[in-house]
Amino acid sequence: MKEIENECIEFKRQYTKETNKDIVAFANSSGGIVRIGVDDDGSIIGVQHPDDVMTQISGSLKDSISPDIIPFVDIVPQFIEGKFIINVTVQKGTKAPYYLREKGYKPSGVYVRKGSSSQPTTDDGIRRLIKESEKFVFEDEISLNQDLTFEFLKKSFTEQNLPFTRSQMLTLGIINSNGEFTNLAYIVSDQFQTSTKVATFEGIEKHKFFDKREFTGSVVKQALDLENYFNAINNNAADFENMTRVESRSYPTDALRETLYNCIIHRDYQVQDSNIINIYKDRIEFISVGGLVGEVNLETIKQNISILRNKKLAEIFRRLGKVEAFGYGIPTIESSYKNTSAKPLFDAAPGVFKVTLKNLNYLKDRNINADSGNRPSVNEAQSVMDDMQKVLGLFSDRNYIIRSDVEKALNISKDKSMRLLKKMIAIGFIEVTGKGQKTEYILK
């Protein structure tokens, strides 16, 4: 039995700009499919050069429809009865009303689907679409892909002694009251297609790749795999304080973990582009797709005021023990760097949010000013040498010195005097003896 045109299916012998009104209508209604290369009666006509037709459609939609409808459209060929047709699958958009630019933001440019036809709406219809769009929650919408499995998610729940029953799936929002899989289900399913890409560079610039990785599968799997990956590369550096070996991570563990999970939980999953993580010798950049939500800005989220884009996804990670409280991401990250000379950086731009974490061991090893990211100048290096010369001068009338002697002689802080003494030990000028309050420094 042949398909017939209905509220969700439209046939077109060939693609023309007139077809865009049907695509707008589907985006403003409940979604649907436009089949290019099919006659009105459902007969397969086919299209010549399907790749060219798909390119034409994509370009036309980008140029002719506002707001951007591309994230809600899939354009794929299908070989049937020995011929190619093009299926243009349109999801219900989240920024309705969508309209034809040449007609403008008015009834003649705003179409909706009624029965098997696409019709211009009214002023009241436009107001209704605006009101409905404000209530749209992407997580709750029905997934276009209903052939989903959840092996990894089920395993993760089992490891935490959590149930993963049909009732639990309904509570979490993975299925709706009609038993249909939601967009949240797709995001956490084994079939999820959008990856997270990690690039490691040899230096502090984007000149040469050292390593490239792509994390795929359920977004829960991506998160856990990424957490394990960062635990492995977050190197320890050994130092000595009062003759005691002290190890420190390149990045504060809390900051790295919080940034990773915020990057995943707050991204915009309507956009199919990958999140990007760039790793340099001196820093890691987390670039999340979607930007900030609503009227939230950097100042408000630093005050623990935030809007969750994906509340139900966040709840899944909370149940898995990966996040504790919502709205404390940036304060937690900043607090992790509180006792260091470095500061994490936050940048928000339309559609993108970036967090930059500084590598503390890299900065420490090179005596780099963490806020500027620059190596010490020639004058700064000369100043350090002058300070060392003053310290050596203290031995002219004594056999040993203590840290407070350096503080007083150079009029510097405790931390700076400790760093200076460590440099002199590393170079070989002096040695340290004793521990705690009995720590002394002698000429080597």
Image (cartoon, helix red, strand yellow):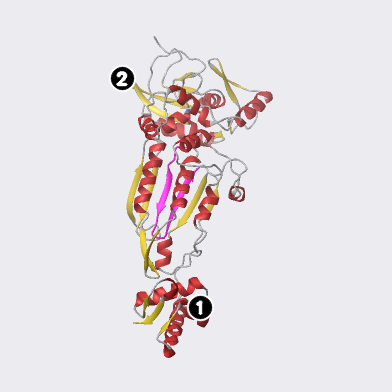
Foreground pick, 49 / 345: 345
> Of helix, strand and loop, which one carries label 1?
helix
Decide if residue 327 is on the left or right side of residue 33.
right
- The residue furthest bottom is 397
Can residue 345 be seen here? The reply is: no
Residue carrying label 1: 407
> Of helix, strand and loop, which one carries label 2?
loop
On screen, residue 135 above or below 210: above
Q: Around disc 2, counting alpha carbons within 10 Å, would you say few (fewer than 14), some (14 to 19), or many (20 or more)?
A: few
Q: Position of residue 36 (x, y in %)?
A: 43, 23
Depth check, mark 2 against mark 1: the one in front is: 1
On screen, residue 335 above or below 270: below
On screen, residue 367 above or below 272: below
Tell whether position 277 is magenta: yes
Tell whether position 410 is magenta: no
Q: Position of residue 318 (x, y in %)?
A: 48, 38
Residue at the image position 41 percent from the left and 21 percent from the top: 37
Residue at the image position 64 percent from the left and 32 percent from the top: 105
Quarter of the figure with the N terminus: top left
Segment colored magenta: 271-289
Looking at the picture, which amino acid does disc 2 mark?
Gly
Which numbered dot is residue 82?
Answer: 2
Quarter of the figure with the C terminus: bottom left
Which numbered dot is residue 246?
Answer: none
Foreground pick, 105 / 314: 314
- The residue furthest right is 124
Looking at the picture, which amino acid does disc 1 mark?
Glu
Foreground pick, 217 / 397: 397
- The residue furthest front is 438
Quarter residue 425 falls in: bottom left
Can residue 295 be seen here? The reply is: yes
